Amino acid sequence: MDKHTCRTELSTMLDNEIDQMEILDSLLVKEKDIIASDSSLLLTINDEKKKIYDALEHYSSMLNAYIQTHGFSPTQDGIESCISWCDNNNILSAKWGLLKENIGRCKKLNRLNGSIVDNSLRSIKQALSILYGQQENEDTYSSDGHENKNTLGRSIAKA
């Protein structure tokens, strides 16, 4: 394998992954906005995210296979070693850095969106608990070993 061919092919692979990560980033931002306002569009966003995840998995598999066939480990260290070996003008290093930044940003957005959903579910559970006169208790037993009771009197619906 010559360095030029390696550099060209890795550049294309990294470009593909960067493109997909940027699309995912914008979808996650859109998802966050939708969670906060119109949850009916979430199914559409989830379908789009599934396509992006599939594309990312495909590109990642291609990159790992390429790296392996050229004697490098399909790990972050292996990819960085291969890039270091064939990248004479730091273009691949820059792309690799951009890809890692995009991955980090998407992880943060995904965690934020998950947190928003968790908080919304918790609020809904609390509202239902109040409505039905139940104490929200996820533990079956208290810290002293006694059984927790889920009902606290009459529900608002019965009052």
Image (cartoon, grey):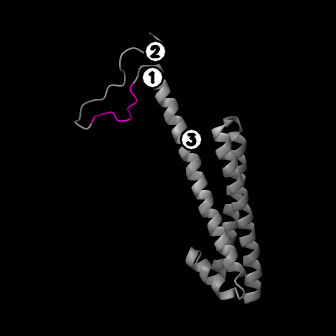
Q: Image point 59% across, 47% down: which residue?
A: 113
The reply to whether the C-beta atoms of the residues labelled 2 and 1 are less than 8 Å apart is yes
Lateral position of residue 134 relative to residue 84, left or right: left
Disc 3 is placed on an element classified as helix
Residue 99, given in percent of the width and then of the height, sits at 66, 68
Amino acid tagged 2? Ile
Q: Image point 22% across, 36% down: which residue?
A: 144
Q: Mark 3 — residue?
A: 117
Q: CA distance from mark 2 to mark 1?
A: 7 Å
Reply yes or no: does residue 70 show up in magenta.
no
Lateral position of residue 137 relative to residue 22, left or right: left
Q: Mark 1 — residue?
A: 130
* Above or below 104: residue 33: above
Disc 2 is placed on an element classified as loop
Residue 130 visible here: yes
Amino acid tagged 1? Ile
Q: Main secondary structure of the magenta part?
A: loop
The span picked out in magenta is 135-142
Q: CA distance from mark 3 to mark 2?
A: 26 Å
Amino acid tagged 3? Val
Residue 71 visible here: no
Q: Earlier in the sequence, mark 2 or mark 1?
A: 1
- Local crowd at mark 1 within 10 Å, few (<14), some, or many (≥20)? some
Q: Mark 2 — residue?
A: 156
Residue 95 lies in what quarter of the image? bottom right
Q: Earlier in the sequence, mark 1 or mark 3?
A: 3
Residue 110, given in percent of the width and then of the height, sits at 59, 52
Q: Earlier in the sequence, mark 3 or mark 2?
A: 3
Q: Image point 49% across, 35% down: which residue?
A: 122
